[in-house]
Amino acid sequence: MLNIKDLVVQYPRSSENALDHISLTLEKGDFVCILGKSGAGKSTFIRSINRLHEPTSGQVKWEGMELTTLPEGEMRKIRSEMVMIFQHFNLIPRMTVFQNTLTGSFGRRPAYKNLLGLFSESEKSRGLLALEEVGLEHHANKRVEALSGGQKQRVGIARALLQDPKLLLGDEPVASLDPTTSRRIFGLLKKIHEERELLSIINVHDVHLAKEFATRIIGLRDGRVVFDGKPEEIDERIFAEIYQ
Ligand SMILES: Nc1ncnc2c1ncn2[C@@H]1O[C@H](COP(=O)(O)OP(=O)(O)OP(=O)(O)O)[C@@H](O)[C@H]1O
């Protein structure tokens, strides 16, 4: 369970709060989509949860553990179970699909093994299973730079699977993909979410995608929660409130 209390983020040299006293409780099993117009605070919210961005004040409790005051070493361990799927994939273009996937296990290995690229047979089998799960097993030896956007995002998801995630954070994971590919990627994320009983929190610009896949939608405007409810509750009035 993720318990967020009075979360505030203020960027340096800004007079406004990017997140303005957000309080939310999100449960395992929730597939949460965050909606809001550009600048509403969606990315800042996602990145404050795993402290890729440090909150200015407030609390973020993950499974009872307060994260905002955790020393960086401890936070790194927790971060390994909080996977992040990025808009621009964050892959290493010249490395193969398989090599990129295996980097998902870096957080749990000694640094020298990562530097030397030493992987055990069981790590390699897990990598192949993850590639099968995202339907890329036949592309394992291709360089990532030769893939389409949708395939790149599948590598990002396979890499995330190697982390044994409990919490899935998506920072606009389909923003650079076409509508059909976006839907497929959302379908894949939802399948993984259900099979692994995750808590998933995903920023998305496309309201239709959010309504189709989310179990809960949170609408942000000017860093505040202006809607928190079920997809079917979003009507024209609520839509206007989020996007006006
Ligand atoms: N590094 C930064 N320095 C200063 N202000 C920032 C910084 N990053 C974001 N902001 C501001 O914080 C607010 C929230 O930005 P954020 O990127 O979280 O919004 P968003 O909803 O994710 O927008 P988008 O949909 O365009 O990605 C905006 O007003 C933005 O200008």
Image (cartoon, rainbow, N blue to C red):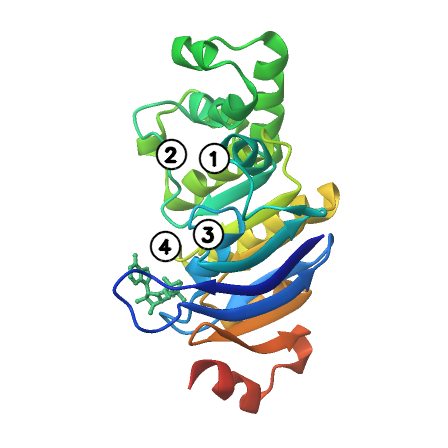
- Near mark 4 (Cα within 10 A), the count class, few <14, some 14-19 or many ≥20, is some
- Near mark 3 (Cα within 10 A), the count class, few <14, some 14-19 or many ≥20, is some
At label 4, the amino acid type is Ser
Number of dots carrying numbers: 4
Q: Which of marks 2 and 4 is nearer the N terminus?
A: 2
Q: Is residue 138 depicted above or below 22 in this figure?
A: above
Q: Say which of marks 3 and 2 sits in front.
A: 3
Quadrant occupied by the C terminus: bottom left
The residue closer to the viewer here, 121 or 62, is 62
Label disc, if present, on residue 155 of the rendered structure = 1
| Residue on which disc 2 sits | 91
The residue closer to the viewer here, 138 or 189, is 189
- Mark 3: secondary structure: helix
| Residue on which disc 3 sits | 47
Measuring from the top left, give residue 234's x and y in whole percent. 61, 81
- Mark 2: secondary structure: loop
Residue at the (44%, 21%) spot, across then down: 99
Q: Is label 3's Cβ within 8 Å of ligand 1?
A: yes
The residue closer to the viewer here, 65 or 165, is 65
Q: Name, please, the residue furthest toward the bottom.
A: 237
At label 1, the amino acid type is Val
At label 3, the amino acid type is Arg
Kindly indicate whether the residue at mark 4 contacts the one at mark 1 (C-beta within 8 angstroms). Answer: no
| Residue on which disc 4 sits | 176
